[in-house]
Amino acid sequence: MTSVLYDAQGPRAKRRNVLYTVLFLVALAALLWWLYSSLDAKGQLAWALWKPYLGGGAEAYSTYIWPGLQNTLKAAALSMVIALPLGAVLGIARLSDHVWVRVPASVVVEFFRAIPVLVLMIFGLALFAQYTDVNSDDRPLYAVVTGLVLYNASVLAEIVRAGILALPKGQSEAAMAIGLRKGQVMRVILLPQAVTTMLPAIVSQLVVIVKDTALGGAVLTFPELLASANTMSGYYGANTIASFTVVAVIYVVINFSLTSFASWLEGRLRRRKKSTGAVLSVEETAGIASHTDTGSAA
């Protein structure tokens, strides 16, 4: 029996795959045992190092982790709220028929995509320090958000543009055939369909935003979640592995929650957009066009 994508496995291929699976599991178990033995031999698994996080005390979380997590979520949320609409505008602008709109948008997108986000953060910090009255305590947050917005808005612009171009041309041609203008085609026909296609890539970029806030802590002294690990490690007796493990787990929980929500939202959008299979008459199609045109004029 064959499939559209591959030939069905024979008896020898099945035995070979089982052997590979067993060998992989054995190698993985050996690696985990070596890692455990190495940490245990160096005393990194001692209860005294993990007690501040697992022993029921709240001091580590209230003093270090929670303030750092708040700053991380604040910077990430601000960057998302600004970068998403800005990226959508730039992506649509790159598809414009007007050269005076398309060319400047393309220059902005390509320029900021080519610069590392860390350079943008450092440049933003220097700008806020020299040309604004922003408090020195708030400058790292402003610089982190500025760098994240400029870089990720450019990346999201390309995601939006690619999502729209991925749709069949017949979608826009059919919409224009019933009298919709290009702006209405983009708003009513193309964007709602492209959102479902773009959602996985958009969420992946949002995860990148959350993780890139750590750059501000490493270079700009922004007191985010990862920076709190260094402080905790020094305060609780150099338990570096324990501190960074706790912080890594928190990052995993945040990003997994974000991707899980996006998967649920994507499935919901796809279910809502399933066609009923009904065929519209000419009168019904003309009514949709006139209704859209009337709504636009209002």
Image (tube, helix red, strand yellow):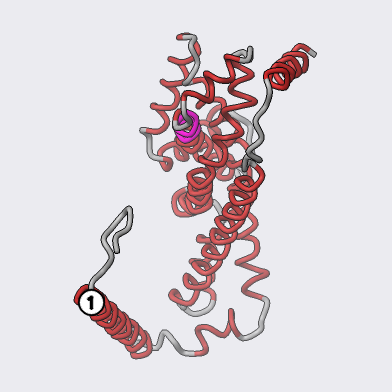
How many marks the image carries: the answer is 1
Amino acid residing under circle 1: Pro
Residue at position x 63%, y 46% from top?
Answer: 77
Q: Which residue is mark 1?
A: 11
Neighbour class for label 1 at 10 Å: few (<14), some, many (≥20)? few
Does residue 58 lie above or below 197 as drawn?
below
- Quadrant into which the C terminus falls: top right
Would residue 225 be counted in the magenta stretch?
Answer: no
In this rendering, the answer to whether 265 lies above or below 190 is: below
Q: Name the quadrant containing residue 129.
A: top right
Q: Which residues are magenta?
A: 157-164
Q: Secondary structure at mark 1?
A: helix
Q: Residue at x 47, y 70 (%)?
A: 244
How far from the left and from the top, in percent, is residue 264? Answer: 61, 55
Q: Position of residue 53 (x, y in %)?
A: 58, 79
The N terminus, quarter of image: bottom left
Percent x, y for residue 265? 63, 50
